[in-house]
Amino acid sequence: MTETIHTPFFKRLSTLYAHMDTAWTAAADHYGFHCQGCVDNCCETEFYHHTHMEKHYLLAGLKTLDPGTAEKIQTRAAMVCKQRTHAKKTGETVRVMCPLNSQGLCQLYDFRPMICRLHGIPHELQRPGSPAIQGPGCETGDPLFSAASYHKFDRTPFYADMASIEMEYRTAIKNPGKIRETIAEMLMN
Ligand code: SF4
């Protein structure tokens, strides 16, 4: 990869992602939980992402694919955006597969954003001066999570590190604006 203004940030992001993956795997192993796909597929959930850095990292990942594959993904992304816009207008609830998911596999697995890495496992979040907020795991894993002792999976340091690197990144790219986009929307840029 050619050295650009993004490079040092992408290296730090990649290291942070590796820490998340290690913590997630340790928690999943504790519960004996191994995601092999399910009806309630989290890749159909309309998650919003809030960092410019993750967006640009994902788009850098898209550039590693062959042009034909990248074009197909962007065509699917446009369709996903259209379906969701239509559903919002009509008040329908839709579940639409992420444009990066092909036959159950993420085509940009190494570049997938934080929420895709942290989802599924019971977790907690510490707020200064408040008790920890507990979050559930996914429904598919629930019988395993309920049967085992609690394994502390604290998202707080990951969120804090992400926010810190993102603030520096925004300064570096001279874009202090907020961002709230789905994967499909990010891929359309
Ligand atoms: S980026 Fe990958 S892991 Fe995340 S929702 Fe899309 S297909 Fe699933």
Image: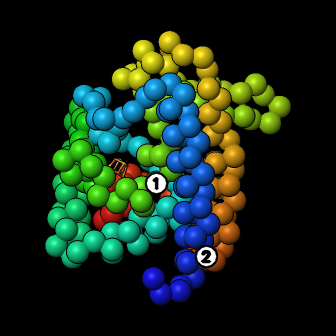
Q: Which residue is mark 2?
A: 8
Camera sees residue 176: no
How far across and down, in percent of the image, does residue 177 sit?
57, 64
Horizontal side, residue 3 vs residue 34: left or right: right
Q: Which residue is mark 1?
A: 113
Above or below: residue 116 compared with residue 11: above
How far across and down, in percent of the image, does residue 61 sit?
38, 68
Residue type pointed to by label 2: Pro
Residue type pointed to by label 1: Pro
Q: Contact, CB < 8 Å: mark 2 with mark 1?
A: no
Quarter of the image for residue 123 reads top right
Camera sees residue 79: yes
Q: CA distance from mark 2 to mark 1?
A: 17 Å
Q: Quadrant of the C terminus?
A: bottom left
Pointer 2 local density, CA inside 10 Å: few below 14, some 14–19, many at least 20: few
Q: Say if disc 1 is inside 8 Å of ligand 1.
A: yes
Q: Quadrant of the N terminus?
A: bottom left
- The image's mark for residue 17 is none
Question: Of 175 and 96, which appears nearest the observer?
Answer: 96
Q: At 46% across and 54% down in the image, what residue appears?
A: 113
How far across and down, in percent of the image, does residue 77 sit?
25, 57
